[in-house]
Image: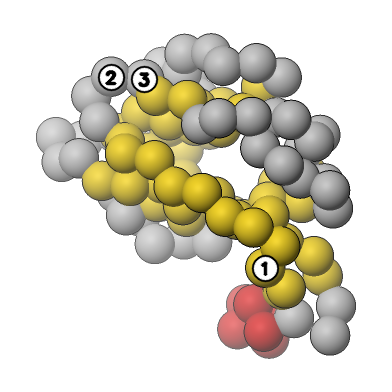
Amino acid sequence: RINKMSQQLRVINNASQAVTNSSVSSSALVVPTGLIRVVATVDSYISLTASAATVDNTGIVIAAGAENLFVVANGSFVNGLRVGGTNGRISITCVSLGK
């Protein structure tokens, strides 16, 4: 089921950022479709905000390698912080659904 959904996602643009033991924020995202896919290489806390912000251990937890879809406003920020002791990366992709 997830594979079928993944095949129907069309990439509009993407960005990535390091995720470490300090909170990091993306640049303002260009999201004309209102839909982003977020994938991290390590378990991470994230928050989705209208401006750059910090995230702590009360943020949304995303598992390493899991695809997560979020509806956000154009210009939103993704803020990240690793859960464990290993640094990684968060990939943020603006996508559209359909064939």
Q: Is residue 58 left or right of residue 65?
A: right
Q: Where, by quadrant of the figure, is residue 43 drawn?
A: top left
Q: Which residue is mark 2?
A: 22
Residue found 64% across the figure and 77% down from its top: 6
Residue found 47% across the figure and 13% down from its top: 54
Residue 34 x, y percent position in the rendering: 82, 46
Q: Which residue is mark 1?
A: 11
Using the rendered image of the protein, determine whether residue 43 is visible from the camera's viewpoint.
no
Q: Which mark is residue 23?
A: 3
Q: Is residue 75 left or right of residue 87?
A: right
Instruction: Give the distance between the C-alpha atoms of the residues marked 3 and 2, in whole angstroms.
Output: 4 Å
Residue 23 x, y percent position in the rendering: 36, 20
Query: Dot 2: within a 10 Å radius of its alpha carbon, few (fewer than 14), some, or many (20 or more) residues?
Result: few
Q: Secondary structure at mark 1?
A: strand
Q: Say which amino acid is labelled 2.
A: Ser
Q: Quadrant of the N terminus?
A: bottom right
Residue found 84% across the figure and 85% down from its top: 99
Using the rendered image of the protein, determine whether residue 78 is visible from the camera's viewpoint.
yes
Query: Dot 3: within a 10 Å radius of its alpha carbon, few (fewer than 14), some, or many (20 or more) residues?
Result: some
Q: Say which amino acid is labelled 1.
A: Val
- Farthest residue to the left: give it: 85
Residue found 80% across the figure and 65% down from its top: 96
Residue 9 x, y percent position in the rendering: 72, 73
| Mark 1 / mark 3, whichever is N-terminal | 1
Q: Say which amino acid is labelled 3.
A: Ser
